[in-house]
Structure formats: structure tokens, C-alpha cells
């Protein structure tokens, strides 16, 4: 897998991205992942966004939400959350939503939902799980190596 990072991504985020990619096994897949850090808000005030297919994924990370800067922890957890979605797209588990109909395909099954229900969809629950697991594992590994 080839990883492309925007030039404004700081070193601490680059290290965390590398760790997350390896943790998730994205590095064992073919394709490309592009990650961009936005200096301001994303559409709909999202922390992050991801879309993709089996060959590539695009990840965007916000620096601000509702005018306030996101914390380092919020940005790092967002990275692992959105990289989980990149993995889901590239493995064909998640097939892009028809945003007009709010339909996505998850592991071969069409799932219709409303924006209010999106956080309870299985691909979101999995991403929330991994954002926490990767974040905790990353800092535990750094503490054990004396780098925290």
C-alpha cells in the first residue's frame, strides 16, 4: 500500500499514522491512501471524513470544529477512526453510500439509515472500537519504550 500525506501533517501525526496503518494491516493491502490535514473545519463540522473503494481511500482530518481547535488526542483518534474506514473500503467490506438515499453496503448487505442513525451503523461501531484500541496501544507502546 502506498501512503500519501499532505505536507502540513506534523511529525507526531506521521508517527501515529504509521503505527495505525501497521496495527490495522493496511500496509499489507494493495492500493493508495491519501491523508490530508485541513487547517479549518470540514463539511458538516466533522472531525474526519473518509471515502474510497478497493483501490484507494481519501482521508481528511479537521484541525477545528465549530471554530475551536481540536486537541491532539481528538486528531489522533480521528486518524485511526478514518483509517479503519479506509481499511473497510479497501477490503470491500464497506461500499460507498448513496448519500441521497442514505444506503451503504456492509459486508454484502444493503443498509439504509438516516443521518441520526449513522453512529449506530456497524462500520461506525468498528471504527470507534479501533480508534480507542489503537490510541491506547500506541501510547502504551511508547511508555514501554520510554518515549511518552
Image (spheres, rainbow, N blue to C red):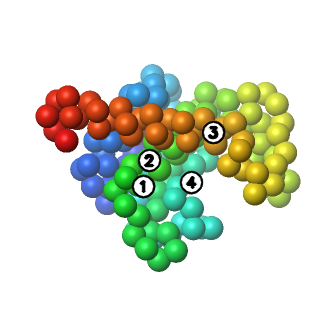
Q: Secondary structure at mark 4?
A: strand
User: Badge 4 local density, few (<14 within 10 Å), some, or many (20+)?
Assistant: many
| Residue at point 41%, 54% (across, down) | 75
Task: Give whichever of discs 1 and 3 has the lower sequence position.
Answer: 1
Quadrant location of the C terminus in the rendered image: top left
**Disc 4 designates what residue?**
49
Q: Is residue 8 above or below residue 30?
A: below
Displayed quadrant of residue 147: top left
| Residue at point 79%, 27% (across, down) | 108
Q: Nearer the viewer, mark 2 or mark 4?
A: 2
Q: CA distance from mark 1 to mark 3?
A: 17 Å
User: Badge 2 local density, few (<14 within 10 Å), some, or many (20+)?
Assistant: many
**Disc 2 designates what residue?**
77
User: Badge 1 local density, few (<14 within 10 Å), some, or many (20+)?
Assistant: some
Task: Give whichever of discs 2 and 3 has the lower sequence position.
Answer: 2
Q: Is residue 125 left or right of residue 39?
A: right
**Disc 1 designates what residue?**
74
Amino acid at each position: 500500500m502506498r501512503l500519501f500525506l499532505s505536507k502540513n501533517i506534523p511529525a507526531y501525526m506521521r508517527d501515529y499514522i504509521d503505527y495505525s496503518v501497521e496495527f490495522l494491516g493496511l500496509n499489507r493491502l494493495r492500493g493508495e491512501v491519501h491523508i490530508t490535514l485541513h487547517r479549518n473545519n470540514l463539511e458538516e463540522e466533522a472531525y474526519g471524513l473518509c471515502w474510497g473503494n478497493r483501490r484507494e481511500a481519501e482521508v481528511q482530518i479537521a484541525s477545528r470544529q465549530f471554530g475551536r481547535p481540536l486537541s491532539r488526542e481528538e486528531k489522533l483518534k480521528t486518524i485511526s477512526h478514518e483509517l479503519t474506514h479506509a481499511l473497510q473500503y479497501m477490503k470491500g467490506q464497506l461500499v460507498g453510500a448513496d448519500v441521497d438515499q442514505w444506503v451503504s453496503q456492509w459486508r454484502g448487505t444493503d443498509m439504509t439509515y438516516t443521518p441520526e442513525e449513522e453512529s449506530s451503523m456497524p462500520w461506525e461501531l468498528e471504527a470507534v472500537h479501533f480508534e480507542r484500541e489503537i490510541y491506547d496501544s500506541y501510547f502504551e507502546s511508547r511508555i514501554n519504550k520510554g518515549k511518552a
